[in-house]
Image (spheres, rainbow, N blue to C red):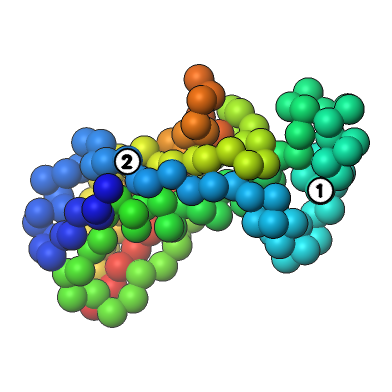
Amino acid sequence: MAARIITDIEELRTLAGQQIGVSDWVEMTQQRINTFADTTEDHQWIHLDRERAAKQSPYGTTIAHGFLTLSLLSGLIRGVVVINAGFNRAINYGLNRVRFPAAVPAGSKVRGRVGLKSVQDIQGGHQFVWDVHVEVDGSPKPAAVAEWITRVYR
């Protein structure tokens, strides 16, 4: 799916309170999980030891870190909507709420279902509150549900 290009903040305001779209699928490879483990120094066996996970994990395989799933939000949202409205920087301002209802098994695919909760004017720019559900292919529950706040400035 091609991302929707927003060139005017007023156009974005009309989308507040709506689902904007769904991103393409992204594969959660074991290599991606391993790299994230090295970056964050979180080497728990459930993420890295395939043999042990096959025997002892309720998932039957290794799983992605919850924070790895969360870190994909930027790319997943960018796959749905791109804001080209003359801003010189965008920042991650924080999260209001995050939950991890389901695991992401290694080798599975995830995608983002993206909604825009609100657009607020702030000094020098705008604040967006995104509602993102990270879905796992074939799972009835999302892997992550997050209310994410970003800001853009001129």
Quadrant, the C terminus: bottom left
Residue 13 numbered mark, or none:
none
> Count of labels shown?
2
* Closer to us: 154 or 124: 154
* N-term-proximal mark, 2 vs 1: 2
* Closer to us: 115 or 79: 79
* Closer to us: 37 or 88: 37
Q: Position of residue 66 (x, y in %)?
A: 64, 43
Q: Secondary structure at mark 2?
A: strand
Say what amino acid the circle numbered 1 marks: Leu
Contact? badges 2 and 1 (CB < 8 Å): no
Image quadrant assignment for residue 78: bottom left
Say what amino acid the circle numbered 2 marks: Val
Q: Position of residue 123 (x, y in %)?
A: 26, 69
Residue drawn 25% across and 69% down?
125
Any part of residue 17 in sight = no
* Closer to us: 23 or 66: 23
Residue drawn 77% across and 63% down?
38
Q: In the rendered view, would you say 124 is above or below 128?
A: below
Give the residue number, with chain letter if any, for mark 2: 22
Give the residue number, with chain letter if any, for mark 1: 48
- Residue ranking furthest to the top: 140
Q: Position of residue 43 (x, y in %)?
A: 84, 53
Q: Residues within 10 Å of mark 2 (few under 14, many from 20)?
A: many
Residue drawn 20% across and 54% down?
4
Question: Could you tell whether 35 is left or right of 8 in the image?
Answer: right
The Cα–Cα distance between marks 2 and 1, rounded to whole angstroms, is 29 Å
Q: Position of residue 101 (x, y in %)?
A: 59, 28
